[in-house]
Image (cartoon, coloured by chain):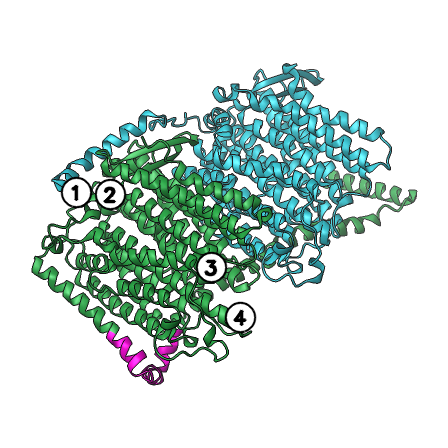
Chain colours: A cyan, B green
């Protein structure tokens, strides 16, 4: 069983999709229930991965599967090669965890063509999972492109008023990047083949060992980097995000924010950086610069938004800037923080979009100025909104803090010290735009008559956000559950990129003996004068 | 022995959960209040136990690790608590005052909407504050640090329907975040620079033990401490980040007493005391701290001179008194700073709760008479000493304390600060002068407040003036306890020059805190030097200053009440400037807030919408346009295609021929 666990998990939603397609069109409840069940089972299937202790000790790929897929003589060989390490583990878990929540959020929001919507959601899940576990570059590309299609339709058919523009913009932006990447992938393949290297299809493990000419790397890296940067999205190629997020239906925004944006950051970690280490070295300051600009820029623009969803979208630009900065720090603390922050952003921003969805379903508006004083009418909603807001601001005790702190600390230790200093201002700005929005939506007098009869959250809605809240605090208070399983993989990635072993200093043991020792040290200093006095 | 230390923060946290989750169902105010008070009282009891235990213990530093928090690479952080004399004093202070103030709130908040919310926030605050003082590493301290900021935000904005209240809450949070920016940078730099020496740590005991690895007086340690100090200016409302504190008075009065006077705002002072070894290594930073502290003490006192809102006067007074504490820290008088932190907690909590009692009475009267007057405006008060005798006397004792009248608590603490600011190896006469002038103004504006509120003719509207009751016991009991502390609390720190004449009365607090500060002071040669006669002289001078201030207030607000009006008429511009708080808020709005907003809008509308999207849409437009144009070539007629084929062939032949 376990040797095909990844495949089972990845393609189980496709099975669900086929069943959904066979169900009658009119029965929305049934369609949604079936979809929910399939996403839930997928989550259950993925659970053993999260519980497996192997990730604590080994940064290698596990649960690997391999099969030859398309083979054109000696010229072209593509394999179905998948596996998972401590980095992709958490992104996979995030995906399987978010999907049932996203499905549950559609219960009242989606009434038009439910069948199509559910089928697309399931297809999307397979595509996303596939992209995270692919170890063959071409296989990755297939899943990567496959993701585009369901999301395109979800925005274009079920989206808001300006949905067509948003969907096309989303598609073209992403496709432009992807095509460049495709060219680069093929170029690498033939470079490898021509160099006479014994390669196994588009295996990334083989490509890692390919010492490409640094000049060539620069071009190839740019193709990858642009493609992933669009997906992240990094400044200045972020403008599709605001439209896509705003126009997408709630479930679409949740998936987009929680999982699909991580595809870009993951792409850097898994592909762009380890494949082209020399080029990375060359471009690192520029990219880090863009990441930091994104942090500040996203925050400043978010501050002035009038539409709640747009505000959250721009806040994503800022948050993802943090993730990128952490990755570019290229040390254990920074990269671990970045990977953790990918999960955090999925949890917090996913929750934010759900929350915006709740009030949108009630009022059919997203304008901040249409609200005000909701706290009085919806106290439970207010509490949950507050918690998620604080998590987004990165208040200690919530998940956001742990990730941001590690990223900034890591970046500060690396060459990017000054970048970290500027990035830290994002901590101030995050408080400004989130609290200002919260104030305008939730505080003040409840004087708009349309808001005076709003119902507080229903039980179903509570069930939708509650799991996310658990992780807000879990990661905030005890992130070690996640950190300990990603650290070996993170270290391995750093070795691949920098060629240097990261400093593994456990110089400060934490366990019980240490405090005693420290006590003595301090006490030894202090004791003498203290005695001198009392006698 | 100390392994149950975590109970101290746990109790209020449980109280927070109970009231927060079930309070709405409980409904009964008495039950809610009892849960809140009991929760914090329990941790007071535990604190007492450990405090007494520590007094007897020969080992004064104890760390308890609850569990690991973050563990990755060089970063190893625990959920760890630290009990030493410094944190022991602080937990006594926090739990004790929080118990009194939570109890007081049972009466004060009676009938308020969201009663349970108030008590759950209050417990959450106590929890966060206890984490702050007990944290054994800088990051756990930071959890408390931001946690108290959050509770402050929630409680300032307690009346969230009022725009001014939610504005004030937001301002407090954001301004504090500016400070936190400094705290974080300081932490990053400290972690990294100690790491360069092979010690990766953020634990306080290890920072203290390894600080010597950094260059004494070097640039690194100066920047680290300056960054941390920026954090302190935010939390403790010092120049330049003090502006949020006066606005914070939008919160209910018990909040002002607990958070914005006695506990949270002193966190910056505590933080410096906690890392005294590091700060002492940076004389330049110490000088900055002393100057900022002295300047804040003076500056805030000037604003306090002309405010008419009873709570605003106290707010500026708090800013000013916090300035004293920083002055103390800056000149190396760590013990004096912590001592003043404690006495200030006593008298300022009493003053705030007393003002709450007055407001409560005024509110009651106005409510009774169906009037909409401002119950906090001192111009509507006067003569209240007969109506509210207990409130009056407790208030008077605390005012005597803050003014520095001999043998009241702050006489000892303030005088010690002034003495150190003059005679310390890190002191300067100019610092003393700032402190002394601030003391003069303090005595003046505090007695101005007392005279305007409790003496003279009652200026309350005739319909309401006879309906001002003394507050019930639930309110006056905490007042009496606090007034007793404000009066006698100074005895814990009787200076040697005085103590030796009264049966060798020991300076208890100095002895108790010696394990924390003495090593640093020895190592960096920080001491106050001067003859006993000089010390006595300056003690006399500060008493004289206090008496002059009180006398002036008496002259202007009792003897010749027309005087203030005359002075205002003579210096209208100066009065306007003081009354409007020197226009600092307007200055910040014009220099920081509005430009930032403008920048955000510009970036969005110009860069995002016009430039990037303009480019994207432009490309789309070009593609679409050229598609439309090229469409005309796809006519579907065979002869057209044949024509173009012929043209192509001709062109190719031509190229060959002419090449």
Q: Earlier in the sequence, mark 4 or mark 2?
A: 2
Residue B277 shows which numbered tag?
Answer: 2
Q: Earlier in the sequence, mark 1 or mark 4?
A: 4
Q: Tell me which residue sits at (60%, 52%) in the image.
A: A311
**Residue A415, quarter of picture:** top left
In the rendering, at what x and y percent does residue B291 appear?
26, 59
Q: Mark 3 = which residue?
A: B108
Q: Tell me which residue sits at (63%, 53%) in the image.
A: A308
Q: Secondary structure at mark 3?
A: helix
Q: Mark 1 = which residue?
A: B523
User: CB atoms at circles 2 and 1 under 8 Å apart?
Assistant: yes
Q: Determine the CA span between mark 2 and mark 1.
A: 9 Å
Q: Are marks 2 and 1 on the same chain?
A: yes
| Label 4 neighbour load within 10 Å: few <14, some 14-19, many 20+ | some
Q: Determine the CA span between mark 1 and mark 4.
A: 61 Å
In the rendering, at what x and y percent does residue A363 appear?
72, 54
Q: Determine the CA span between mark 4 and mark 2.
A: 54 Å
Chain designation of label 2: B
Q: Tell me which residue sits at (56%, 40%) in the image.
A: A345
Magenta segment: B551-579
Nearer the observer: mark 3 or 1; the answer is 3
In the rendering, at what x and y percent does residue B231 appear?
37, 51
Residue B571 drawn in magenta: yes
Q: Residue A125 versus residue B475: which sits nearer the camera?
A: B475
Nearer the observer: mark 4 or 2; the answer is 4
Chain designation of label 3: B
Q: Residue B53 versus residue A111: which sits nearer the camera?
A: B53
């Amino acid at each position: 069983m376990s040797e095909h666990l990844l495949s089972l998990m990845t393609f189980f939603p496709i099975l669900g999709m086929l069943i959904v397609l066979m169900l009658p069109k009119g029965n929305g409840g049934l369609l949604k229930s079936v979809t929910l069940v399939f996403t839930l089972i997928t989550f259950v299937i993925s659970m053993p991965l999260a519980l497996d202790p192997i990730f604590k000790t080994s940064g290698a790929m596990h649960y690997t599967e391999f099969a030859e897929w398309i083979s054109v003589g000696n010229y072209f060989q593509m394999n179905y090669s998948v596996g998972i390490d401590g980095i992709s583990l958490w992104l996979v878990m995030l995906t399987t965890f978010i999907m049932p929540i996203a499905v549950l959020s559609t219960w009242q929001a989606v009434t038009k063509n439910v069948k199509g919507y559910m089928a697309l959601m399931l297809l999307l899940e397979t595509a996303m999972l596939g992209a995270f576990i692919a170890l063959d570059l071409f296989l990755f590309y297939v899943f990567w492109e496959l993701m585009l299609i369901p999301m395109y339709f979800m925005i274009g058919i079920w989206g808001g008023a300006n949905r067509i523009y948003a969907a096309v913009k989303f598609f073209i932006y992403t496709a432009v990047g992807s095509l460049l990447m495709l060219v680069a992938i093929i170029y690498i393949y033939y470079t490898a083949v021509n160099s006479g290297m014994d390669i196994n299809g588009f295996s990334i493990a083989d490509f890692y060992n390919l010492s490409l000419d640094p000049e060539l790397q620069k071009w190839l890296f740019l193709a990858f980097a642009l493609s992933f940067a669009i997906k992240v999205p990094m400044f200045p190629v972020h403008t599709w995000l605001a439209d896509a997020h705003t126009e997408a239906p709630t479930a679409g925004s949740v998936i987009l924010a929680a999982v699909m944006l991580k595809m870009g950051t993951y792409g850097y970690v898994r592909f762009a950086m380890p494949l082209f280490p020399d080029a990375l070295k060359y471009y690192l300051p520029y990219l880090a610069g863009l990441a930091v600009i994104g942090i500040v820029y996203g925050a400043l623009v978010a501050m002035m938004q009038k539409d709640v969803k747009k505000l959250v979208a721009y806040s994503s630009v800022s948050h993802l800037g943090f993730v990128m900065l952490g990755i570019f720090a290229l040390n254990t603390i920074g990269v671990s923080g970045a990977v953790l922050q990918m999960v955090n952003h999925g949890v917090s921003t996913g929750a934010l979009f759900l929350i915006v969805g709740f009030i949108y379903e009630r009022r059919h508006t997203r304008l901040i100025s249409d609200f005000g004083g909701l706290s009085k009418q919806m106290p439970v909603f207010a509490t949950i909104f507050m918690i998620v807001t604080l998590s987004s601001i990165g208040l200690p005790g919530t998940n956001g803090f742990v990730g941001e702190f590690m990223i900034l600390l890591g970046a500060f230790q690396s060459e990017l010290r000054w970048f970290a200093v500027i990035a830290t201002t994002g901590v101030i700005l995050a408080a400004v735009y989130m609290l200002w929005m919260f104030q305008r939506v939730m505080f003040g007098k409840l004087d708009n008559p349309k808001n005076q009869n709003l119902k507080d959250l229903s039980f179903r809605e509570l069930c939708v956000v509650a799991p996310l809240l658990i992780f807000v605090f879990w990661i905030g208070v005890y992130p070690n559950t996640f950190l300990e399983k990603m650290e070996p993989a993170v270290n391995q990635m750093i070795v691949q990129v920098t060629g240097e072993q990261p400093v593994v200093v456990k110089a400060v043991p934490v366990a019980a003996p240490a405090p005693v020792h420290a006590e003595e040290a301090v006490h030894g200093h202090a004791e003498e004068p203290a005695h001198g006095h009392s006698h | 022995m100390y392994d149950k230390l975590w109970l101290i923060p746990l109790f209020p946290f449980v109280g927070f959960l109970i009231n927060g989750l079930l309070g709405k169902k409980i409904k009964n105010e008495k039950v809610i209040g009892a849960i809140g008070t009991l929760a914090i009282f329990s941790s007071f009891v535990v604190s007492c136990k450990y405090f007494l235990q520590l007094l007897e213990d020969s080992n004064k530093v104890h760390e308890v690790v609850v569990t690991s928090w973050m563990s990755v690479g060089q970063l190893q952080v625990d959920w760890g608590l630290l009990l030493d004399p410094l944190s022991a004093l602080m937990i006594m202070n926090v739990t004790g005052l929080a118990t009194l103030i939570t109890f007081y709130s049972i009466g004060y908040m009676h009938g308020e909407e969201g009663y349970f919310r108030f008590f759950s926030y209050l417990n959450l605050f106590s929890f966060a504050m206890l984490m702050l003082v007990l944290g054994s590493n800088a990051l756990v301290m930071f959890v408390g640090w931001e946690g108290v900021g959050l509770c402050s935000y929630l409680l300032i904005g307690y009346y969230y329907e009022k725009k001014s209240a939610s504005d004030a809450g937001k301002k407090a949070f954001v301004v504090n975040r500016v400070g936190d920016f400094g705290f974080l940078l300081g932490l990053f730099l400290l972690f990294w620079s100690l790491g360069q020496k092979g010690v990766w740590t953020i634990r306080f005991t290890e920072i203290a033990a390894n600080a010597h690895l950094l260059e004494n007086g070097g640039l690194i340690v100066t920047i680290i401490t300056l960054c941390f100090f920026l954090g302190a200016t935010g939390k403790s409302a010092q120049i330049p980040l003090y502006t949020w504190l006066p606005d914070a008075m939008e919160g209910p009065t018990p909040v002002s007493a607990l958070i914005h006077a006695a506990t949270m705002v002193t966190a910056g002072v505590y933080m410096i005391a906690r890392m005294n070894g590091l700060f002492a290594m940076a004389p330049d930073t110490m000088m900055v701290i002393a100057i900022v502290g002295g300047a804040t003490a003076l500056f805030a006192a000037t604003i306090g001179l002309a405010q008419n809102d009873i709570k605003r006067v106290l707010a500026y007074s708090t800013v000013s008194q916090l300035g004293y504490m920083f002055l103390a820290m800056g000149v190396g008088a760590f013990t004096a700073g912590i001592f003043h932190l404690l006495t200030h907690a006593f008298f300022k909590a009493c003053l705030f709760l007393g003002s709450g009692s007055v407001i409560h009475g005024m509110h009651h009267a106005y409510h009774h008479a169906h009037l909409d007057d401002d119950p906090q405006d001192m111009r509507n008060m006067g003569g209240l000493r007969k109506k509210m005798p207990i409130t009056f006397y407790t208030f008077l004792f605390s005012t005597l304390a803050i003014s520095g009248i001999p043998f009241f608590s702050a006489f000892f603490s303030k005088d010690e600060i002034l003495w150190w600011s003059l005679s310390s190896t890190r002191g300067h006469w100019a610092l003393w002068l700032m402190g002394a002038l601030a003391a003069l103004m303090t005595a003046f504006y505090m007695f101005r407040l007392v005279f305007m509120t409790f003496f003279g003719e009652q200026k309350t509207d005739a319909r309401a003036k006879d309906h001002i009751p003394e507050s019930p016991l639930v309110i006056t009991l905490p007042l009496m306890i606090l007034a007793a502390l404000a009066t006698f609390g100074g005895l814990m720190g009787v200076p040697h020059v005085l103590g030796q004449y009264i049966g060798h009365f020991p300076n208890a607090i100095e002895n108790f805190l010696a394990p924390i500060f003495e090593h640093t002071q020895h190592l960096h040669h920080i001491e106050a030097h001067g003859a006993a006669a000089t010390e006595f002289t300056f003690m006399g001078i500060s008493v004289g200053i206090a008496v002059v201030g009180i006398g002036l207030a008496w002259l202007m607000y009792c003897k010749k009440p027309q005087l203030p009006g005359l002075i205002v008429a003579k210096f209208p511009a100066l009065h306007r400037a003081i009354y409007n708080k020197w226009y600092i808020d307007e200055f910040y709005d014009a220099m920081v807030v509005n430009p930032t907003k403008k920048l955000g809008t510009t970036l969005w509308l110009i860069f995002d919408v016009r430039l990037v999207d303009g480019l994207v849409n432009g490309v789309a437009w070009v593609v679409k346009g050229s598609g439309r144009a090229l469409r005309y070539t796809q006519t579907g007629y065979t002869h057209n295609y044949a024509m173009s084929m012929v043209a192509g062939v001709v062109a190719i032949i031509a190229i060959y021929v002419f090449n």
